[in-house]
Image (cartoon, rainbow, N blue to C red):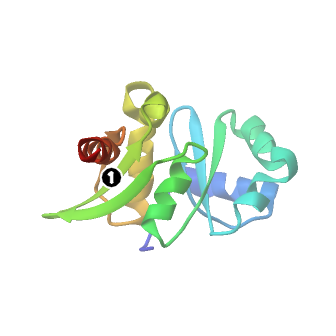
Amino acid sequence: MGKLRLTTDEIMKIGLFEKISNVPVLDCVATEDRLAFIVKEGDAGAAIGKGGEHVKTAEEKFGKKVDIIEYSDDWRKFIRNIFAPLQLEDVWIKRVGKDVIAYIRINPRIRRAIYGEKGKNLERALNILKRHTKITKIRVIVGDNRRKEKKNVENTQE
């Protein structure tokens, strides 16, 4: 993880959440209606608190929905953590020219949750990734084309 520039507002939010949860926070990403706190690997449970009490307290204080995201040096795991509790079918990363692209394969049923209204969930995820990794783009693949191809191959052999 490289150097991260935080605004005064982000520093204040991090300080308040650290007081509430007693867990060190690596980063804070704010949108109009949500706050995401990035914590060290293994600290998510403590940050959330028993029965979600720390998150509930923070939501009351900030007046926004609060998400806790566990950081990981494994970019694929970090991407899964950003989208949790949604289950991604597959995650892989490729360098294409100057870009480092994260590909996520999802079930069509969770498509709306992944994108969010006008793509804001995907935009927030990319913003978080750009702050902590070298990933510059996210590509979403809906459904599993590979499985369909396998089924066709199996059916032709019978």
In which quadrant is the N terminus drawn?
Answer: bottom left
Residue 128 found in image quarter: bottom left
Q: Residue at x 75, y 65 (%)?
A: 23
- Taking the view exactly as shown, the residue that stands out farthest to the left is 97
Q: Is residue 21 left or right of residue 89?
A: right
- Taking the view exactly as shown, the residue that stands out farthest to the front is 158
Q: Residue at x 63, y 46 (%)?
A: 67
In which quadrant is the C terminus drawn?
Answer: top left
Q: Residue at x 29, y 41 (%)?
A: 155
Q: Position of residue 135 (x, y in %)?
A: 32, 61
Please determine whether, in this image, residue 11 is positioned above or below residue 108: below
Residue to which mark 1 is pinned: 103
Q: Is residue 49 left or right of residue 129?
A: right
Q: How many marks?
A: 1
Q: Is residue 8 visible?
A: no
Q: Secondary structure at mark 1?
A: strand
Q: Position of residue 63 (x, y in %)?
A: 69, 33
Please determine whether, in this image, residue 63 is positioned above or below residue 102: above
Q: Nearer the viewer, residue 96 or 66?
A: 96
Q: Nearer the viewer, residue 41 or 124?
A: 41
Q: Amino acid at mark 1?
A: Tyr
Q: Position of residue 154 (x, y in %)?
A: 30, 47
Q: Residue at x 35, y 42 (%)?
A: 144
Q: Position of residue 120 (x, y in %)?
A: 42, 34
